[in-house]
Image: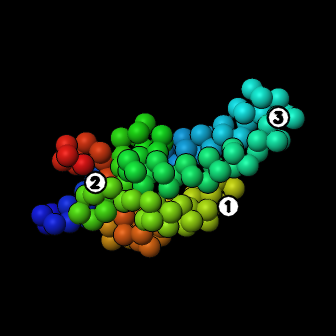
């Protein structure tokens, strides 16, 4: 492991793929709940009038949570974190790049995330295409220095 780029080696930790897969499904449930819970709580009429708010929350979920903290709810539950090669938080730009590619490669309606799994298994540093494009890695949070 190099001192400047610790995440490249940490991303190779055995068992990272199942953690990522479970985390992705947890996040999918969270996103579905962003649409279902407000409808049930507010009633359909008010929900329809406030739908842009709920869609905005849906769109911002990954860029904000992963960009600012390195973790979505799925990553918190699975003990993983998104970081740069240096182990830093990815920031909004990198998280937005990851999110855009996620629409295709992790989408449960399009092959259930299989493209992302194939990319992670095939790539040198266990990255999906979104990680490669953004320059990020998903690692076990416990493996990171406490300052991250």
Label 3 or label 2, whichever lies nearer to me, is: 3
Q: Residues within 10 Å of mark 1 (few under 14, many from 20)?
A: few
- Name the residue rendered at 19%, 43% in the picture: 146
User: Is residue 55 visible from the viewing direction of this image?
Assistant: yes
| Residue 6 shown left or right of residue 31 in the figure | left
Residue linked to disc 1: 110
Q: Nearer the viewer, mark 1 or mark 3?
A: 3
Cβ atoms at labels 1 and 3 below 8 Å apart: no
Task: Kindly tell me whether residue 105 is visible in this rendering.
Answer: no
Residue 9 lies left or right of residue 137; in this view the side is left
Image quarter hosting the N terminus: bottom left
Res. 46 mark: 3
Quarter holding residue 111: bottom right
Towards the viewer: 16 or 7? 7
Q: How far is the residue under mark 1 from the one under mark 3? A: 31 Å
Asked which quadrant contains residue 89, the reply is: bottom left
Write down the residue under mark 2.
13
Give how far across and how far down residue 58 sits, in percent: 63, 49
Q: Position of residue 48 (x, y in %)?
A: 83, 41
């Amino acid at each position: 492991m190099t001192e400047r780029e610790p995440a490249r080696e940490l991303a190779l930790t055995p068992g990272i793929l199942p953690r990522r897969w479970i985390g992705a499904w947890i996040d999918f449930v969270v996103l579905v709940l962003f649409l279902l819970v407000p409808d049930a709580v507010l009633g359909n009429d008010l929900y329809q009038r406030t739908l842009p708010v709920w869609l905005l929350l849906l769109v911002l979920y990954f860029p904000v949570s992963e960009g600012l903290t390195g973790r979505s709810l799925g990553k918190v539950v699975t003990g993983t974190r998104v970081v740069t090669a240096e182990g830093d938080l990815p920031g909004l730009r990198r998280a937005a790049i990851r999110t855009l590619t996620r629409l295709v490669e992790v989408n449960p309606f399009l092959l259930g995330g299989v493209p992302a799994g194939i990319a992670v298994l095939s790539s040198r540093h266990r990255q999906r295409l979104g990680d490669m494009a953004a320059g990020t890695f998903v690692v076990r949070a416990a493996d990171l220095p406490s300052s991250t």
